Image (tube, rainbow, N blue to C red):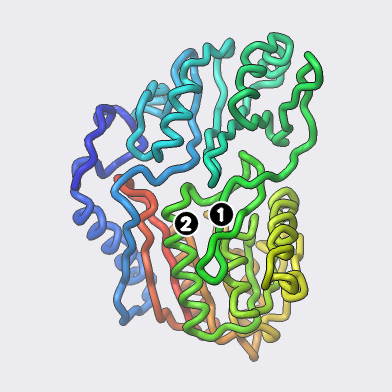
Amino acid sequence: MQVDCKYKEKCAGCQYLDLSLKEQHQLKKKHLLDLLNQAQIPFNGVLELTSPAPAGLRDRVDLVFDRGSLGLYEKNTRQILDIEVCKQLSAPLQSWLTEVRNIKWPIQKGSLRLRVGPQGQRGLWLDFANIDIKNLLEEKAILSGLLEKAHVEIGQRHKVLTKVGEQLKLTDPEPHIWFQSRIYGKPVDLYCSVGSFTQTGFEANRALTAVIETWLNDVDAQHILEFGSGIGNLSFPALGKSRKLTACEIDRDALAGFEKSVEALSKQSGFENIRDRLQILQGDFQNRNPQNFGTFDTVLVNPPRSGLKDFLKPLIAETRKPQHFLYMSCFPESFVEDGKRLQEAGYQLKRLHIVDQFPQTTHYEVLSLWG
């Protein structure tokens, strides 16, 4: 199956529109296996691949506004291609984009994140210059109209737009339900900001968390150390089966959302003791790691594109190592670099799984199990 897109000759967003889904999957598998081979990381198992859908997987999208055009960069230029319809968007997100496109923004340039939540609620994050924000607040009509349709956040600090009487105000960020994870195979609401990092869509994320949940059950994990917990997307699958979890994260806002999600879940029947099994640590764990790896049987990581950096240093010297290491990444190059260090620490690559949550592009999500 191929996705028909009228922008394929110009848009830089998708690279594989001329290929069938089967051909895309073959290329992605080959790319990953070639990287492992070049790094001399042996893998004797079967590389599995899950393809949730050929398109329509995005429930959030980041777009650039430039002098009247709202969309993505054109191929080989710095021009913005005005995009009315994107086949990568879910139907609710496409509907929201259509409405946002009707706004006549009185600015030159900025970026927008559009998001739909698990109950269909709409969110919009505007990252504009301070002078543009000031003018919009004074103009009132555009932002007031948006508030009738969506939750609106503005600026790098994700200030929340509110209306008090006839006055528009920006208040401190407050987490709301914008995403979902799972525990025991059931959905868990995740609190965060519209501008927070999450996976790109619900359907693909269900596939990702299902693999993580299955692997943790298969290795009978009991006490897990997690690096890069963010808002808790992988943390909740890790907390199934009465497991203990120590979650490490640098982003305070992400952890505020995580804490609120834990609080909400703990009020549900059967999860009253979940907080007792969870320790949350805030810090720069890429550049320092105070944890004693020997106290855990499993490590779970989902690092940024730059990889694990110094998080792995204590593990290499550790004599009593965790038995299992689960590594998830959307950047295969840093995954392979960290894989070399895992080999140095004595681990072997046991299982490998691609979730194709970015169809029509060269990108994909890697899940791996080391032991």
From the image, state whether disc 2 or disc 1 is nearer to you. 1
So how many labels did they put on this image? 2
**Would you say residue 37 is visible in this rendering?**
yes
Which residue lies most toward the bottom here? 320
Viewed as shown, does residue 21 lie left or right of 147? left
369 lies left or right of 40:
right
Q: Position of residue 106 (x, y in %)?
A: 58, 10
Image height check: is 301 above or below 363? below
Query: What residue appears at the point 64 percent right and 56 percent down from the top-left corner?
Result: 230
**Residue density around tag 1, few if under 14, some if 14–19, many if 20 or more, within 10 Å:** many
**Residue shown at 79% from the left, 36% from the top:** 172
- Who comes first in sequence, dot 2 or dot 1? 1
Q: Secondary structure at mark 2?
A: helix
User: Any mark on residue 311, and which?
Assistant: none
Three-letter amino acid code of the residue under disc 1: Gln
Q: Give, as a three-letter code, the residue at label 2.
A: Asn
Q: Which residue is mark 2?
A: 205
Image quadrant assignment for residue 173: top right
Specify few, some or many for label 2: CA neighbours under 10 Å numbering under 14, 14-19, or 20 or more.
many
Residue of label 1: 180
Are dots 2 and 1 in contact, CB under 8 Å? yes
The quarter holding residue 296 reads: bottom right
